[in-house]
Image (spheres, grey):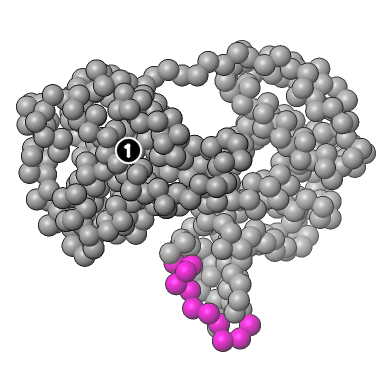
Amino acid sequence: MADIRLLLTDKEIARLPRPRKGSYLARDTELKGFFVVVGKRKRTFTVQGDLREDGKRATSIRVAIGDVKELSTRTARATAKEYLAQISRGQHPKAGSKPSRVAASGDSPTAHQSGGITLRQAWERYRDAHMIRKGRSERTIESYRDHVERIFIKWLDTPLEDLGRHPGKVVERHDEITKENGPYIANGSMRTLRAIYSHARKANKTLPSDNPVGAIDWNGEKRRDTGMGPGDLRAWFSELSALDNPIRREFHLFTLLSGCRPTALQETTPGNIDFKRRILHIPKPKGGAKRAFDIPLSREMIRCLIRVMRFGHQMHPSHARQWIFPADSVSGHIVEQKEDRATLSKWGNDLRQSFRTIAAAAGVSEFDAKLLMNHAIPGVNAGYITRPKLEDHLRRQQQAISSTVFAALNANSPSIRRWPKSTNSQLLNPRAHVIADDIRGQQGLKSAIAE
């Protein structure tokens, strides 16, 4: 079968036909050198580029990124960009491969050979063998990449052994980052360095056993206390109703009602909703696919989803087929959740904290609140909990939280029909359920709203 060209996405890759024999390439139209090798039984993200020496082509190489069953296209594309950049500098992306004959600017090849594994090589191994293989989220991988390639950019080609034998360098860098970027970023970047060093030492026993990050004095960190209680909600709803974009309004409202991490909500699809069971499936929460869970839906949450689906089909008809919260973005869904604090005082993690606070006010136990928020349950008892058996119980707790949220508005009905730009007196409307007829083909939809 002849090679083809298309914009690679998870959906398009799933549609690729299986070859009768051999394999073929599905090349990406957006990133040159990035493609999927499609075989009878396996499909592999791959990059191809020319290693150069003295500005001339030395050899062309192909490097596998990973199986399409284990990686999302977005993660693979980000990795491909990094691999291609390394190839263009004359460096083979795969750690343990033949050493590059061309050193990057400022590199010292002899130092690399004598000093062992560098931070750059250790990071690539940690990313591929630990983070990607274990299904870490794209946002987590990007956070680590930012620490390594921005905060520690001057150390990328420094042998880890040098840092291990001179921990004072790490202490000085932590102090510098604290002054330049703040205490939280300084601590976070050092946690990244600590993890990479510990992982590298498993295969490089010549590295000093003491992790150099252990020498720093950590900056004090205080949990951000930005959640709202029931008494704060009326003013917040007034701010929310003034937002122009109805999809963003519903996104913030659903974040409050669910307590879910906004980054996980951004990538939910209509197929993740089961109105019959009254759940929203979160396939890729923090911690990766192995932490996937179902959010039980209250009546108010169901109405919120119905409204945003209707708005989505009106405003972004093509993207709305794929995403619950569509937007005019490259990905097709909401990416940037931030709002001007002067316009909307609470958003993002503020609403997650608010959910936890309101859950306590609603009389929901700490244990149930952790299950609703997909928090890890400490102790051996966590392994004995079967979440699907608790769906009805957790849904009642969810309903108690939603009812407490809307009771704080001093309104007779807890249902939002529309979001006016001016007056708040029209914010609530008891006939919100009529918009259910705008969404067809969802089994159990009307009964879910009525319950």
Can residue 323 be seen? no
Q: Give x and y (percent) for residue 70.
A: 58, 59
Q: Residues within 10 Å of mark 1 (few under 14, many from 20)?
A: many
Q: Assess whether residue 15 is covered by the magenta stretch.
A: yes
Can residue 242 be seen? yes
- Looking at the image, is 199 positioned above or below residue 44? above
Q: Nearer the viewer, residue 145 or 348?
A: 348
Indicate left or right for 163 with 151 as reference. Answer: right
Label 1 is placed on what type of residue?
Gln
Indicate left or right for 383 with 404 as reference. Answer: right
Q: Residue at x 83, y 39 (%)?
A: 201
Q: Nearer the viewer, residue 44 or 408?
A: 408
Q: Residue at x 47, y 69 (%)?
A: 14
Q: Residue at x 16, y 56 (%)?
A: 446
Look at mark 1 in the image and give the residue it sits on. 397
Report the magenta residues as a range: 12-22
